[in-house]
Amino acid sequence: MATEAQILMALQEVKDPEIPVISVVDLGIITKIEVGENNSAKVTMTPTFVGCPAIKHMQHEVQIAVEALGFDTVEVVVDYTTPWNSNMVSERGLQQLKDFRLSPPKRHCGTISMADLENAQCPNCFGHNTTLLSPFGPTLCRAMFKCNNCGEGFEQFKAV
Amino acid sequence: MQSLKDFLYTIADDNLILGHRNSEWTGLGPVLEEDIAFSSMAQDKVGLAYQLYQLLHTDMGEGHPDKVAFNRTETQFKCCHLVEYPIGEYDFSLVRHFLFDHAAFARFDMLTKSAYPALAQLSVKVRGELKYHVLHADTWMKKLGKGTEESKARMQTALNEAFPLAMGIFEPVDMEQELIQHGYFEGEAVLKERWLASIAPVIEAAGLKLPEIVHDKTSYGGRKGYHTEYLAPLLKEMTEVFSIDPEAEW
C-alpha cells in the first residue's frame, strides 16, 4: 500500500492548469493527506480563490493520480478548513512562478498591507521600481503591473 | 434555524445578482483593465454565492446550488435593491461597487468570528479576496473624485443616487436577534456603523460629500422578497439557458 509520502510525490505531477509549471503541492492547495484502512486514501484540498474555475479540474486530476497508486477507494474533498493564502506557496513554487515570468507573491504576516502590493519585482529586469496597474488580471490570482525600469508590463501572483 | 437560512440567502443572493451585473461589463469596460477588473469581481462574487448556496445545501437541506440560483421565482430572492439596478454609466457601477464591497469586507471580517464554523472558515478566505475589491474601488473613487470637473460631478451624482439604495444592504432578516444570541453574526446595525466608518475617509479623500440619510428604510424590502422592477428582467436573462433544459447535465 502506498504511503502518504508517495501520494505527495504523485501529486507533484498534478499541475495548476492556469500556471502549468507549478504543482498543486507547491501551490499549497493540498491541505491534508490520509491513508486509511482497507486500502483507502483521502486527500483534502482548498482553492486559491473561492471562485477559482480550475478547482474541479484539479480535484479530478488529483483523484486520477492517487488512484493510479493502487488504492481501492480514493476520496478527494474540497473544503475551507485550512483556507489558502499565498504564504502556503512553497519556496520551490515561488521559483517556478518566477521562471514562468510571474512576479511571486511577497511573504506576509497574515494580513496584507498596501506595502505588500507595491513594488512587485519585475520578472524581466528584476527591478523593483514598478507600478500597480490593476489589482485584477487574466486569472483571479493575478494582478497587473508596469515596470518603470524596463518599461515592460508584467503580472504578479497576488499576495492573499 | 430559519433566521440563519434567511441570512445566508441574503448574502448569497446579493452576491449572485451583483456578480451578474458586474459581468455585464465584460467586453464593454471603458478600458481593458476595467473590463478585466469587473469580470474578475463578477467571478469572485458568483463563486462566493455558489459556496454559500452549497452551505445551505449541505448543512441545512436546501436545494442544489444550481437549482437555487436558477430556479427560484423573483419573490424567493432576498437580495437588496442596490444590486438589482442596471449597470448604468460607469460612474454608477463604480460607486455601487465601492459602497457594496466596503460593506462586504466589513461583513466577512465580522463573520470570521462567527459561531458557525464553516461560515467562519469561508469568511477568512473571502475577506482576503475582498481586500482587492476594496482597493480597486478606493483607487477609482479617488482618481475620479479628484479628476476633472465632469468626473467629480458625475461621481457625486452617482453617490447621491446609490447611497440611499445602499441602506437596503443593512435591512435585517426576521428574527435577527436569534443570530446575535447564537454568536453567528453581530447584527446589521453594528455592521452599518463599521461600514460608515470605513467609507467616510475615502469619500473625503476623494473630495466628495457623503450624502445625508433622511430616511434609511426607503430601500428596504429586498430581504422580504419585494424587489425593484429591474430584478425580473435580470432573472429572465440569467436563467434563459438553464430554462431551455432544466435537467441538463453540465
Image (cartoon, rainbow, N blue to C red):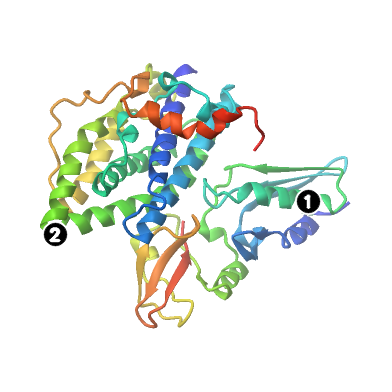
Q: Nearer the viewer, residue A123 or A137?
A: A137
Amino acid type, mark 2: Thr
Please, is residue A12 above or below residue B196 in the view? below
Q: Position of residue B20 (x, y in %)?
A: 42, 39
The residue under the point 38% across, 16% down is B175
As drawn, the label of residue B239 is none
Q: Nearer the viewer, mark 1 or mark 2?
A: 2
Q: Quadrant of the C terminus of chain B?
A: top right
Please, is residue B170 above or below residue B210 in the view? above
Q: Nearer the viewer, residue A18 or B149?
A: B149
Q: Nearer the viewer, residue B228 or A70?
A: B228
Q: Position of residue A41 (x, y in %)?
A: 79, 45
Q: Position of residue A103 (x, y in %)?
A: 48, 70
Give me the chain letter of mark 1. A
Give me the chain letter of mark 2. B
Q: Nearer the viewer, residue B44 or B135?
A: B44
The residue under the point 16% across, 25% down is B215
> Quick check: do tags 1 and 2 share a chain?
no
The answer to whether one can see residue B79 in this image is: no
Amino acid type, mark 1: Ile
Q: Position of residue A15 (x, y in %)?
A: 67, 61
The residue under the point 37% across, 17% down is B174
Query: Disc 2 marks which residue?
Result: B148
The answer to whether one can see residue B59 in this image is: yes
Q: Measure how far apart labels 1 and 2 are at the Cα level.
A: 57 Å
Query: Disc 1 marks which residue?
Result: A64
